[in-house]
Image (tube, rainbow, N blue to C red):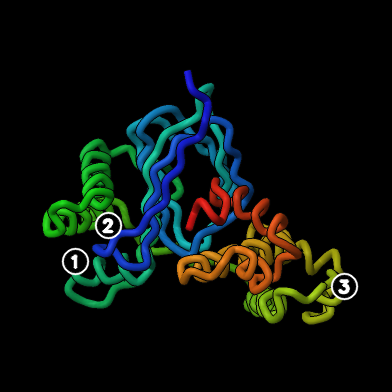
């Protein structure tokens, strides 16, 4: 029995700006990270364990885990042999437009509950759409399969994001901290300097940031760098230049973090 991982990322002209993935992972362990898209997976075999929104989940064959944009999560095997799955990384504007079309009016941003979806009909539709996008011999049929799958997902399972009861002052502070972390990605930055931006001690600044984002400041900054790197790689920028532009110390540093979040090296992903 083979234990080698098999990973393929690709894009489809039918769904611009979306990434698609088919993979089998045996020992891959994803570090805590987030995507700026809706992440919709279909588990084909085995089982995946992941931490998400304060709980640990196990997704086994036939189920559909859905992760909302910007939400921190991990990923690892939940059983011997790992897991096999197909993943849609759906752009926010695409999902929003489908929802608006379904309602025939502008709607709030769709939001999905934390539990794993167990809906055999949805699973079949998602798999049909993913296969059709992978080999779009019939572009019209592939586009219909995609819209059928996503609209079924939204009609049956989407809701509205629950209100977040946080103090306004804390929200403003966190946004200030994020802005500082994003301002110059190559700049060495200490926790003391960061805390000074919001008038807190290093301990309270770090605790506030981790509580609100799910990641420590340095980890959040690295993930922001990685999300920026994806756009540069898509534009054909060489990986060495992407590493520098994204604020990583060198290519090996960039590659190590990239693989922890996306399961492949930057070169393989591109």
Instruction: Looking at the image, tell me whether mark 3 or mark 2 is earlier in sequence order.
Output: 2
Counting every numbered tag in the picture gives 3
The disc, 2 or 1, on the residue closer to the chain's N-terminal end is 1
Q: Are marks 3 and 1 in contact (CB under 8 Å)?
A: no
- Name the spot of residue 13 as percent of width and height, x first: 27, 64
Query: Residue 4, image x and y in percent?
Result: 52, 30
CA gap, disc 3 to disc 1? 49 Å
Query: Pointer 2: residues within 10 angstroms few (<14), some, or many (20+)?
Result: some
Dot 2 and dot 1 residues touching (CB under 8 Å): yes
Instruction: Kindly identify the residue that appears in the image at 87 percent across and 73 percent down.
Output: 192
Task: Mark 1: give few (<14), some (14-19) or many (20+) Cα within 10 Å.
Answer: some
- 4 with respect to 113 (left or right): right
Q: Is residue 26 above or below residue 97?
A: above
Instruction: Give the residue at mark 1.
Output: 102
Q: Nearer the viewer, mark 3 or mark 1?
A: 3
What residue is shown with label 2?
154
Circle 3: is it few (<14), some (14-19), or many (20+) Cα within 10 Å?
some
* Residue drawn at x 22%, y 39% as measured from the top left: 124
Per the model, the C-alpha gap separating discs 2 and 1 is 9 Å
Instruction: From the image, tell me which residue sits under label 3.
Output: 192
Image vertical order of residue 262 relative to residue 225, above or below? above
Q: Quadrant of residue 65?
A: top left
């Amino acid at each position: 029995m083979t234990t080698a991982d098999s990973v393929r990322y690709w894009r489809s002209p039918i769904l611009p700006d979306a990434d698609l993935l088919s993979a089998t992972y045996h020992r891959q362990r994803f570090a805590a990270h987030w995507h700026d898209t809706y992440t919709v997976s279909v588990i084909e075999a085995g089982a995946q364990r992941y931490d998400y929104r304060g709980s640990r989940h196990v997704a086994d064959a036939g189920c559909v885990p859905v992760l909302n944009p910007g939400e921190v999560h991990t990923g690892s095997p939940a059983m011997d042999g790992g897991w096999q799955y197909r993943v849609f990384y759906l752009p926010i504007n695409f999902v929003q437009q489908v929802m608006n079309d379904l309602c025939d009016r502008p709607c709030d941003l769709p939001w999905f509950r934390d539990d794993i979806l167990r809906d055999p009909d949805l699973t079949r539709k998602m798999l049909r759409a993913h296969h059709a996008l992978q080999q779009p011999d019939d572009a019209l049929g592939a586009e219909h399969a995609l819209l059928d799958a996503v609209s079924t997902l939204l009609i049956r399972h989407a809701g509205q994001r629950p209100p977040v009861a946080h103090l306004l002052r804390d929200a403003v502070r966190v946004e200030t901290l994020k802005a500082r972390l994003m301002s110059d990605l190559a700049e060495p930055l200490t926790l003391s300097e960061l805390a000074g931006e919001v008038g807190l001690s290093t301990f309270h600044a770090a605790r506030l940031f981790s509580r609100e984002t799910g990641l420590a400041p340095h980890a959040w900054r690295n993930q922001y760098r990685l999300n920026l790197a994806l756009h540069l790689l898509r534009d054909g920028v060489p990986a060495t230049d992407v590493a520098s532009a994204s604020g990583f110390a060198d290519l090996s540093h960039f590659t190590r973090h990239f693989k922890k979040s996306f399961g492949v090296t930057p070169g393989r992903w591109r």
